Amino acid sequence: MSRSTTASPPPAAAESLRGLCGGAVHLPGDPGFDMASSPWNLQVQHHPAAVAYPASPREVADVLRAARGAGLQVAPQGTGHGAAPLDGHLGASVLLHTAGLNELSIDVDTRRARAGAGVLWGDLAEAAGRDGLVGLHPSAPDVGVVGYSIGGGIGWYARRLGLQCHSITAAEVVLADGSVVRASADEEPELFWGLRGGGMPLGVVTALEFQLYPLDTVVAGFLAWDRTRMEQVLPAWAQWTTTAPDAATTSLRLVTAPPMPQIPAELHFRELLVIDGAVLGSDDEAAAILAPLRALRPEFDTVTRVPAPSLVRLHLEPEGPTPGYASSRLMSGLPDDAIAAVLDIAGPGAADGPDITEFRQLGGALHRPNEGAALSSLDGEFLVLGFGLRPDPAEWDEAREQAVRLLDALQPWQNGREYLPMLDERSDTRKAFPPGVHTRLSALRAAVDPDRLFVGPHL
């Protein structure tokens, strides 16, 4: 990951943006510019030509026209969780923050939500939960609804209900020419298709409408073992996933437990293997599904029926700006040789493993094609992630190297496809889509943004 420590002076033309967005435009050297240009991931140091905070589609259009006139590109950004691939690439761009686009409404009768591009999943989960509804949210509450949704969206209900992008029913989009359009199955259908997981910058999505699901409570929680049990538990979980019903969506993590109040004090600072997730169904059905894992005698078992909105914090991911590196690969399976490689890199006592090793269970509805979306399905049985979380900048390179070492060690069992939202390195989008889909996406981008006004995180 490239980093720069000093900002370049902005192009003189960036001065033309001053006064837009009611004055919510920052240029290098302005008070507050450094904070305005800083994303959620504190390892990333953006140095854009300007930062703008529009509060309406009209203000977004004003920024796009001014940027075009100034010879600048535009990079839309919500929270900045996926900002790492843009690191070092925004010197001639306007960073367009969507935090001010914060409308949120729930239609209980149609079970649909409308969320502006500044809405976070924690807020939506709480609002929908008051009416006994859930969205297909991620594993952290401070992720933006729009960015997560149009990128794909793998949540705790994914194996039963699929990708979040498949639940999108309409989008409000400001195109490169400043026009505001509504995209749905009936209006701008090709744009609608591309926004459902396409991973290419097609415009500024200012609001999304999407399906919600009736769910008051869910059986969810975590099972934890000391990492010395890894040689028994990891292969048993991998085998369990091959027959587990779609009602269950889980992940397995190798982690040092942080001293968080939600974690039993007895686990603090211990090296653990943790399986967490959710099971849709009755208590008895969930107990039968989880019985093979409980037979491995976890040291801690918090799985019980909980309010559905609480699942947005089930994974206990850090909230608020955090320095970190995270990248992933899609795997065709976890055979014995792959498990042996994980043990070598991240097993008990291993010194070179990443801070967190994680495997997310795929399959089920994630394998079933939805031809109305650019990301029709997700190949692979597992998504493996390597995380590096270090507060000390002097350790950032080491944290990244350890995460990459894990992913490289598992290369023989990867399927060659990538899931773009969980990549902290720039990648070729042809690795994410079949050739025909990529060609169609490229043609769509050329039609709606022929001059490449928008900067994308991937090539």
Image (cartoon, helix red, strand yellow):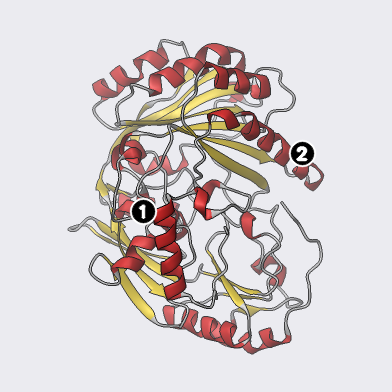
SS at mark 1?
Answer: helix
Q: Which of the two labelled residues, at mark 2 and mark 1, occupies the earlier sequence position?
A: 1
What label does residue 398 carry, if any?
2
Percent across and percent down for residue 320 are 59, 52
Is residue 157 something that shows in the picture? no
19 or 325: nearer the viewer: 325
Is residue 423 something that shows in the picture? yes
Name which residue type carries label 2.
Answer: Glu
Is label 2 in contact with label 1 (beta carbons under 8 Å)?
no
In the figure, 409 relative to 317: above or below?
above
Q: Is residue 379 left or right of residue 452?
A: left
Q: How many marks?
A: 2
The crowd level at tag 1 (other Cα within 10 Å; few <14, some 14-19, many 20+) is many
What label does residue 41 carry, if any?
none
Residue 119, by quadrant, is: bottom left
In the figure, 95 relative to 342: above or below?
below
Q: Residue at x 60, y 75 (%)?
A: 73
Percent across and percent down for residue 142 are 51, 52
The crowd level at tag 2 (other Cα within 10 Å; few <14, some 14-19, many 20+) is some
Percent across and percent down for residue 254 are 59, 26
Percent across and percent down for residue 286 are 30, 24
Name which residue type carries label 1.
Answer: Cys
Q: Residue at x 41, y 10 (%)?
A: 295
Q: Is residue 392 left or right of residue 228?
A: right
The C terminus, quarter of image = bottom right
Q: Residue at x 65, y 24 (%)?
A: 346
What label does residue 165 carry, if any?
1
CA–CA distance in space, label 2 to label 1? 34 Å
Q: Residue at x 66, y 46 (%)?
A: 324
